[in-house]
């Protein structure tokens, strides 16, 4: 009889059990529906308290981002509130790439995930609490293919139109933790950053662009296997109603500043990606991005500019992506914020690595940088 049991039939759960022998298990990651993407995992292990558990996730050389596994440590929690890092190794040669997680739970249950999960229930709590704050409007932009609401929180009395979007890729849960920190700042009447932004801006915030993928335990796609961050040029009701609804609302409101919040599997750093490859890009247009990046770099040691994505050559931007399409369509400053699954190489914290707490603090720092960006522009 097996000593441990493994479950993943819950909100954002993802794992396939191949074999259990005593306190050891051989596991595999389930692909996104109608897609080849596979990287996100989230499952529960129950068994005798105080006994070591060994979990092997195999075939990871065939995952979406194999370069994400070397140097990565799995997230673990026994109360689903505090997420630490478990002892983890990766062997590229074993069973076509094997991640081995070793952990000794204090109690009878432990939860493991690629990053600390952000459930749809917590999403609804986040949205409801923010919507109950004075001056905040909850706008239902539309409906997903699974029938879930697509929520947008709107607030502020200023002229500058600011959009924040997150979790186009549902397994990038860092993004909604970031949103939680940002919304706490914006809805706190005592927070000077939130007050300053609400005076100067009208803010439009979509905390989760992909509710279906989030609930289904996907890494990167929606209910029908569509990568939403490749749909911004020609979104459709059949494949990408989420993007279509958001872009339609942007057309109504206009956009002066936009940030799309993500997570990156391989790069152990927080960084920004811009729109250098836009056709006809001017120094003035890209100057807004460069100025914001410099402000954020100065404000927090959790951000840096040394590591990141290669910049697109002039005229070679991928116009299907949110940042480039928004920057071009509205002639505004736009950017993609990337946070790691791994710990920061320049500023590590071994117990938790990059964590929900750090995501939330970065959310407020990004807002403070935006306030400075607006104030210096006005000056």
Image: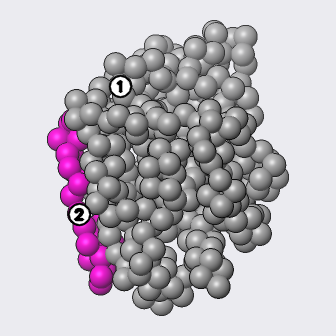
Q: Hey, which quadrant is residue 24 in on the image? A: top right
Q: Residue at x 73, y 19 (%)?
A: 91
Q: Residue at x 41, y 78 (%)?
A: 159
- Give the image location of residue 277, x and y in percent: 64, 40
Residue pictured at 35% horizontal, 34% vertical: 234
In contact (CB < 8 Å): disc 2 and disc 1: no
Query: Does 232 lie within the magenta span?
Result: no
Q: Disc 2 marks which residue? A: 139
Task: Relative to 25, say whether 73 is above or below.
Answer: below
Q: Position of residue 107 (x, y in %)?
A: 50, 47
Position of 345 with respect to 322 (left or right) is right
- Between 8 and 137, the one nearer to me in the picture: 137
Looking at the image, is 321 positioned above or below residue 22?
below
Q: CA distance from mark 2 to mark 1?
A: 26 Å
Region of the chain picked out in magenta, as a range: 126-150
Residue at the bottom extreme?
190
Residue extending farthest left: 147
The answer, for residue 329, to whether it is visible in the render is: yes
Identify the residue at horizontal 43%, vertical 62% (top origin): 255
Q: Which mark is residue 225?
A: 1
The quadrant of the image that shows the N terminus is top left
Q: Is residue 43 above or below residue 129?
A: above
Q: Is residue 37 left or right of residue 154?
A: right
Judged left or right of residue 326, residue 286 is right
């Amino acid at each position: 009889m097996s000593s441990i049991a493994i479950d993943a039939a819950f909100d954002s759960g993802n794992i396939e059990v191949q074999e259990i022998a005593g306190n050891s298990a051989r596991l595999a990651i389930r692909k996104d529906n109608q897609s080849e993407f596979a990287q996100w995992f989230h499952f529960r292990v129950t068994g005798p308290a105080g006994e070591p558990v060994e979990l092997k996730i195999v075939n990871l050389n065939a995952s979406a981002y194999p370069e994400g596994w070397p140097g990565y440590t799995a997230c673990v929690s026994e109360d689903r509130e505090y997420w630490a890092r478990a002892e983890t190794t990766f062997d590229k040669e074993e069973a076509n790439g094997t991640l081995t997680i070793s952990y000794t739970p204090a109690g009878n249950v432990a939860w493991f995930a690629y990053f600390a999960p952000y459930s749809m229930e917590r999403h609804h709590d986040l949205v409801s609490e923010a919507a109950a704050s004075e001056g905040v409007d909850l706008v239902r932009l539309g409906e997903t293919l699974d029938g879930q609401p697509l929520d947008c929180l709107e607030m502020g009395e200023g002229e500058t139109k600011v959009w924040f979007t997150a979790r186009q890729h549902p397994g990038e849960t860092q993004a909604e933790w970031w949103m939680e920190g940002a919304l706490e700042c914006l809805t706190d009447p005592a927070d000077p950053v939130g007050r300053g932004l609400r005076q100067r801006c009208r803010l439009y915030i979509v905390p989760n662009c992909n509710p279906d993928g989030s609930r289904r335990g996907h890494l990167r796609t929606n209910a029908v296997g569509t990568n939403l961050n490749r749909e911004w040029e020609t979104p459709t009701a059949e494949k990408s109603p989420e993007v279509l609804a958001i872009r339609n609302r942007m057309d109504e409101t206009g956009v002066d500043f936009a940030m799309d919040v993500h997570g990156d599997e391989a790069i152990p750093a927080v960084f920004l990606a811009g729109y250098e490859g836009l056709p006809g890009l001017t120094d003035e247009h890209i100057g807004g991005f460069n100025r914001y990046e410099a402000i954020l770099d100065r404000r927090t040691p959790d951000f840096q500019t040394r590591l990141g994505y290669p910049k697109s050559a002039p005229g070679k931007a991928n116009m299907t992506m949110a940042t480039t399409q928004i920057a071009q369509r509205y002639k505004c400053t736009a950017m993609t914020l990337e946070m790691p699954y791994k710990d920061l190489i320049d500023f590590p914290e071994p117990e938790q690595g990059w964590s929900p707490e750090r995501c939330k603090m970065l959310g407020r720092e990004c807002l403070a940088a935006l306030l400075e960006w607006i104030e210096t522009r006005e000056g």
